[in-house]
Amino acid sequence: MKTLCIRCILWVFSVLFIQQAAQAQAAPTTQQPVPAAPDVVLPHQAKKPKVKKQWKYAIDIDAGFASPNNRELSDVFKGGVNASIGVKTAFLKNKLWVRPVGGMKYYFKNINWGGTGREAFRTFKAGLELQYNAFAVKNYTFFPLFRADQNWSSSQLTQLVANKDATAPFKTTHNVLTGSGYSFAAGIMVVRSGDLYVKLNYEYYKPDLKVNPDLVQEMLAAGYSIPDHKVFDCSSINLSVGVNLNFKK
């Protein structure tokens, strides 16, 4: 009996040992964590440092000769003075220059008007000019240009030297004609070494000019009937020479 009990106990321990060994073999092997590979940044994916754009700008000043391109104005004035000034800045990789501009055009001539007098036609201008860097030849760069302006025009008569024996044909002298309108110009600018330039353009300008009401009444009293306004062709060809100031290269 005692021997049978000892056999049973040994048999139970043997079964438990075999069961534990089987469970140990069936359990999965614990794997060590594999460190993640560092991210690889390709050359084309690298972020480029931001570079602050350096704006280029220049101050353009030019003056020259204006020639009327029609008989209405050329019969009165043979030529005049044309001048402008503006600050311009560059766009499109420094190919396109935008120039807000102001200027003046002035025609004048001496007349015999109760002595020695002067007749003048003056136009103040404010607008925008576009200059495009088309190509360069040696030290010369060629810029086709386009310009649009708002204009304010007036005509005056001024007595320089009075003649006591002569009588002026009429008394109204200030702002004989007044008017405003838009003008459009196109041409070419040639720049030498980035500083000096020559500009040639054609300007189309046809303002509706009003006659001074006092002059209308004065002429009517003298037996002459004149219209109170008229559209004048004030188009012109302009040739000027200029310089760039404070030019940042």
Image: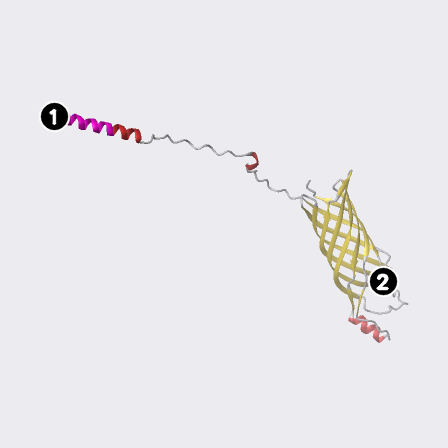
Q: Is residue 16 above or below residue 177?
A: above
| Secondary structure state at the residue bearing disc 1 | helix
Magenta run includes residue 189: no
**Residue 175 visible to the viewer:** no
Q: How many numbered badges does the structure rendering display?
A: 2
- Mark 2 and mark 1 lie on one chain; the one further toward the N terminus is 1
Q: Amino acid at mark 2?
A: Glu
Element assignment for label 2? helix
Which residues fall within the magenta stretch? 1-19
Residue 42 position in % (x across, y down):
54, 34
Q: Is residue 234 left or right of residue 34?
A: right
Residue at left 76%, top 58%? Answer: 183
Q: Residues within 10 Å of mark 2 (few under 14, many from 20)?
A: few
Q: Magenta span has 8?
A: yes
The quadrant of the rendering that contains the C terminus is: top right
**Nearer the viewer's eye, disc 2 or disc 1?**
1
The image quadrant where one finds the N terminus is: top left
Front one among 31 and 146: 31
Task: Name the residue beneath numbered marker 2.
Answer: 72
Give the percent coordinates (x, y) of residue 108. 83, 58
**91, 232: nearer the viewer:** 91
Q: Residue furthest top?
A: 3
Q: Which mark is residue 18?
A: none
Per the image, the residue denoted by label 1 is 4
